[in-house]
Amino acid sequence: MRITEIYQSIQGESSYAGLPCIFVRTTGCDLRCTWCDSEFSFYGGQSMSIDEIIERVTSYSAKLVELTGGEPLLQKELPVLANRLIDLGYTVMVETGGHRDISLLNHQVIKIVDIKCPDSGESEKVFWSNINSLSNQDQLKFVIASRKDYEWARQTIKERNLEGRFELLFSPAHTTLKPADLAEWILSDGLKVRLQLQLHKYIWSANARGV
Ligand code: SF4
C-alpha cells in the first residue's frame, strides 16, 4: 500500500472527536476539492506491506484507528488491512471522499463518508449508492464553505431522507466560514446535525502535520 504517514494523535472530527486515535494516511486522491487541507498526500509516500503498517500501528497505545487520505479506497488492500485491524481488537474508521464504492468494507468498519457540497467543486461525483451500504453507526460529513453550501446540504438531507438514519456532521470549511455563522444557521433551522470543528487545528495549528 502507498502510505503518506502513520501517527498517533487526538481524533479531531466525527462523534469520536477528542479520543486518542492512530491515523494511517494513504497517498493519492482522485478528487481536487477547492478547500482541501491534505494536498501533501496527493503524491509521494512510501510503499508499505500490511504487516509493516500493523507493526507501526501496534507500536502506539490507542485502540482506535482511522484509515484516511488522500482517498483510502484507492488502495486495493484497504479492506484487508481493515479486517486485520478489527481482528486485533481495534475500532476502525475509514474516511472517504464519498465518490467510491464502500460496500467492500467490513460492516464493522465505521464509515465517515463525505458528501461534497457545491463549493468543493466535486459535488457531481458523489456516489449516492453508498447510502444503501451504510448503517446507523456510520456518519455523513458535509464540509460547508458558504451559505449556498449550507442550503444545498439542508435540502439534500430533506430530499434524501437522511435525518435520523445516520450521524450527520456539518463542518465549516476552515478558511471560508466562521463556526459561529454555521451554528446560528443550524439553530435557526432546528437541524438535527452535529456541528463539528476540526479539533486538531485548535489544539495545534491549522497547518500542523503528524499531530
Ligand atoms: S477528497 Fe479529501 S483528500 Fe481528496 S481532494 Fe477532497 S479533501 Fe482533499
Image (cartoon, helix red, strand yellow):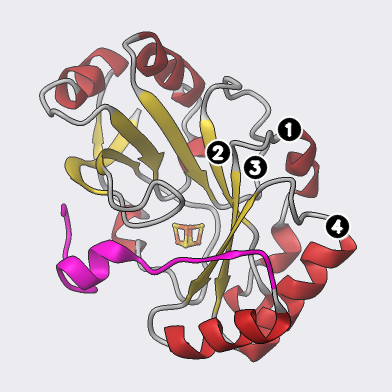
> Mark 1 or 4 closer to N-term?
1
Label 1 – label 2 distance at C-alpha: 10 Å
> Mark 4 or 3 closer to N-term?
3
> Mark 1 or 3 closer to N-term?
3
Task: Please name the amino acid that badge 3 sits on.
Answer: Arg
Q: Position of residue 204 (x, y in %)?
A: 14, 68
> Mark 2 or 3 closer to N-term?
3
Label 2 – label 4 distance at C-alpha: 18 Å
Q: Residues within 10 Å of mark 2 (few under 14, many from 20)?
A: many
The residue indicated by pointer 2 is: 111
The residue indicated by pointer 1 is: 133
Q: Are marks 4 and 3 in contact (CB under 8 Å)?
A: no
The quarter of the picture where residue 182 lies is bottom right
Numbered tag placed on residue 160 in the rendering: 4
Q: What SS does tag 2 mark? A: strand
Judged left or right of residue 54, residue 90 is right
The residue indicated by pointer 3 is: 100
